[in-house]
């Protein structure tokens, strides 16, 4: 009955919206998609993408958007109030292992990441940024309110707009990360509530928190940007893309064989598409010829991240997809004996040195292309309490100096802003390039330490952005029916594709005072006060009485006899 009432409510909502504003109701659409990719390690990668398109204008002067149908009102009000042109936010638990799993469809660093392009009419960008982080903190139930000027940077080249417009004035861009942010159910629940069908119908019924968080990697994100609706860009629309990526581990799932199903992954099966969705599909990667049941005659080929892949397609809007049982439970078996295509771009980072005074940050970038060199853009944001010695910066490739063709460095200000370092580096073919810089640890005030200072302080991931040469010709044609997983980053040329790689976050120890000393002082002080003051107080408040000396034994015996005889006693 609850499910029937929910579907009836959605139908009434649809008809009411169309009756009130028929033109507005036809201007938005919703698509949902799930991609399942078996990995050579035996793990399995599932990527959800939900896209809402709405051809309205939140930033038009004098126009207030009041009617919302599919687009969430909470995010629409944020866009209009703070004059946001693009917003990208992600919450990630775990680290994406590029060399084992390949490249993800949409990368994200561990913890929380937020970068926003504001409209060029905003006069106080820092003020809007501060208010925006507090509002998003409430919407997603996260610690984004800890984002302030001490961990916010303005990249000059690394984060260009992914939507319409070629903005070059980085004064309207803000970027910040919280590498220690823990992602949990309280972040997933408001994320699911932004979907038109919530978690009641469609692919979102698979998003069961106890299964998603029992995984090796979990990342949820929200991307909002203006996009074109056709190849000539005659009409524009706002795109809200909600993505969720998860990697289930072969062994922690309680099974040792490479056999997965929807029920084993999510403890649920698919029974219907979201009634509000114009497209609802499941793509299963069958490039390496796994056993898939039930089989489907629908096949699709796509060039994804420089690799041509083949997918079996299950269209949930067609009744025959679910069979007689009205339930779809995909089963995958594979051996995984083939070789995985090595990612052409890979990066790592670590801290070297000893002691608590100085250290060295090493960033290693790998170009695995056998014969092509290409440039990469490296961005590092380092907290102010790690004081960089920029004159010690070295870049070496194949044991030779590699001089960057572009360097942008903004020094830190204590307790005001972090270091920002951006470099354009040419990577030789089949090479390893190492970037090193020395730093000195600063002494913090005792009130600036975290509650667990001996755990260490986190430094956000380095960001490597590049146009990587493609082994296969990329598809540059714009079509509305192309899969969502291959249309997030627009492809401008057939010979290359855009890749963004995040390194590991760093955990750095700082000189930490002995916070047990105040406890010892408190204990000692309390003991001294209790003994000294207690004795003094006892002397001041006690009443004293004179105790008369007792008579000797002979007199006491004599007085006993006198008392019996009735004679006066001796004194």
Image (cartoon, rainbow, N blue to C red):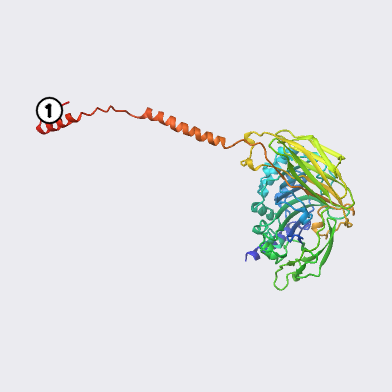
Q: Position of residue 213 (x, y in %)?
A: 66, 56
Q: Is residue 50 above or below residue 295?
A: above
Please report the residue visible at 68 percent of the width from the left and 55 percent of the height from the top.
193
Within 10 Å of the Cα at label 1, are there few (<14), some (14-19), or many (20+) other Cα atoms? few
Q: Residue furthest left?
A: 565
Say which quarter of the image contains residue 446.
top right
Q: Assign the N terminus to one quadrant of the image.
A: bottom right
User: Element type at marker 1?
Assistant: loop
Q: Is residue 132 above or below residue 238?
A: above
The answer to whether residue 60 is seen in the rendering is: no
Q: Assign the C terminus to one quadrant of the image.
A: top left
Of residues 347 and 491, the one drawn nearer to the viewer in this rendering: 347
Say which quarter of the image contains residue 293.
bottom right
Of residues 528 and 271, the one drawn nearer to the viewer in this rendering: 528
Say which quarter of the image contains residue 277.
bottom right
Of residues 182 and 232, the one drawn nearer to the viewer in this rendering: 182
Q: Position of residue 556 (x, y in %)?
A: 17, 31
Q: Residue furthest bottom?
A: 324
The answer to whether residue 549 is seen in the rendering is: yes
Q: Position of residue 570 (x, y in %)?
A: 15, 26
Q: Position of residue 94 (x, y in %)?
A: 70, 52
Q: Identify the residue position indicated by label 1 in the image.
A: 568
Direction from residue 157 to residue 519 in the image, left or right:
left
Direction from residue 42 to residue 546 in the image, left or right:
left
Figure disc tally = 1
Q: Residue furthest top?
A: 571
């Amino acid at each position: 009955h609850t499910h029937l009432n929910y579907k009836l409510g959605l139908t009434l909502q649809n008809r009411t919206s169309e009756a009130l504003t028929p033109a507005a109701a036809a201007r938005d659409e919703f698509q949902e998609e799930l991609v399942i990719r078996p990995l050579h390690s035996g793990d399995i990668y599932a990527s959800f993408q939900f896209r809402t398109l709405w051809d309205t204008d939140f930033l038009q002067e004098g126009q207030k958007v009041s009617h919302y149908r599919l687009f969430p009102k909470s995010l629409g009000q944020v866009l209009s109030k703070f004059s946001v042109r693009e917003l990208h936010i992600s919450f990630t638990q775990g680290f994406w292992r590029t060399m084992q799993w390949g490249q993800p469809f949409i990368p994200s660093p561990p913890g929380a990441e937020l970068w926003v392009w504001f409209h060029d009419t905003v006069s106080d960008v820092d003020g809007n940024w501060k208010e925006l982080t507090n509002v998003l903190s409430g919407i997603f139930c996260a610690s984004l309110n800890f984002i302030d000027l001490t961990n916010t940077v303005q990249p000059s080249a690394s984060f260009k707009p992914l939507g319409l417009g070629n903005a070059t004035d980085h004064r309207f861009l803000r970027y910040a990360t919280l590498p220690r942010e823990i992602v949990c159910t309280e972040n997933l629940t408001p994320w699911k509530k932004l979907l038109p069908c919530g978690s009641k119908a469609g692919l979102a019924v698979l998003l069961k928190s106890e299964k998603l968080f029992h995984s090796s990697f979990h990342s949820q994100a929200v991307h909002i940007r203006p996009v074109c609706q056709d190849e000539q860009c005659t009409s524009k629309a706002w795109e809200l893309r909600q993505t969720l990526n998860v990697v289930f581990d072969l062994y922690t799932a309680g099974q040792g064989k490479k056999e997965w199903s929807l029920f084993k992954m999510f403890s649920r099966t698919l029974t219907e598409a979201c009634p509000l969705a114009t497209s609802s599909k499941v793509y299963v990667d069958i490039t390496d010829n796994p056993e898939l049941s039930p089989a489907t005659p629908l096949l699709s080929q796509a060039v994804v991240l420089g690799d041509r892949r083949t997918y079996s397609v299950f269209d949930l809007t067609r009744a025959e997809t679910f069979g007689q049982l009205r339930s779809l439970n995909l089963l995958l078996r594979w051996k995984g004996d083939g070789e995985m295509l090595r990612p052409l771009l890979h990066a790592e980072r670590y801290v070297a040195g000893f002691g608590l005074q100085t250290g060295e940050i090493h960033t290693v970038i790998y170009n695995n292309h056998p014969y092509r060199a290409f440039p990469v853009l490296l961005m590092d944001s380092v907290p102010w309490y790690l004081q960089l010695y920029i004159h010690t910066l070295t870049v070496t490739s194949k044991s030779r100096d590699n001089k960057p063709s572009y360097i942008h460095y903004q020094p830190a200000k204590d307790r005001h802003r972090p270091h920002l370092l951006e470099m354009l580096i040419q990577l030789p073919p089949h090479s390893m390039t190492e970037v090193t810089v020395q730093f000195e640890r600063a002494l913090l005030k005792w009130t600036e330490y975290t509650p667990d200072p001996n755990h260490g302080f986190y430094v956000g991931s380095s960001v490597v952005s590049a146009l990587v040469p493609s082994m296969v010709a990329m598809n540059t044609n714009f079509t509305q029916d192309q899969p969502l997983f291959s249309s997030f980053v627009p492809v401008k040329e057939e010979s290359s594709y855009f890749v963004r790689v995040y390194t590991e976050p760093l955990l750095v120890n700082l000189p930490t005072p002995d916070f047990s000393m105040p406890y010892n002082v408190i204990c000692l002080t309390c003991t001294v006060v209790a003994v000294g003051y207690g004795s003094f107080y006892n002397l001041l408040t006690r009443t004293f009485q004179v105790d008369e000396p007792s008579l000797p034994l002979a007199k006491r015996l004599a007085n006993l006899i006198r008392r019996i005889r009735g004679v006066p006693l001796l004194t």
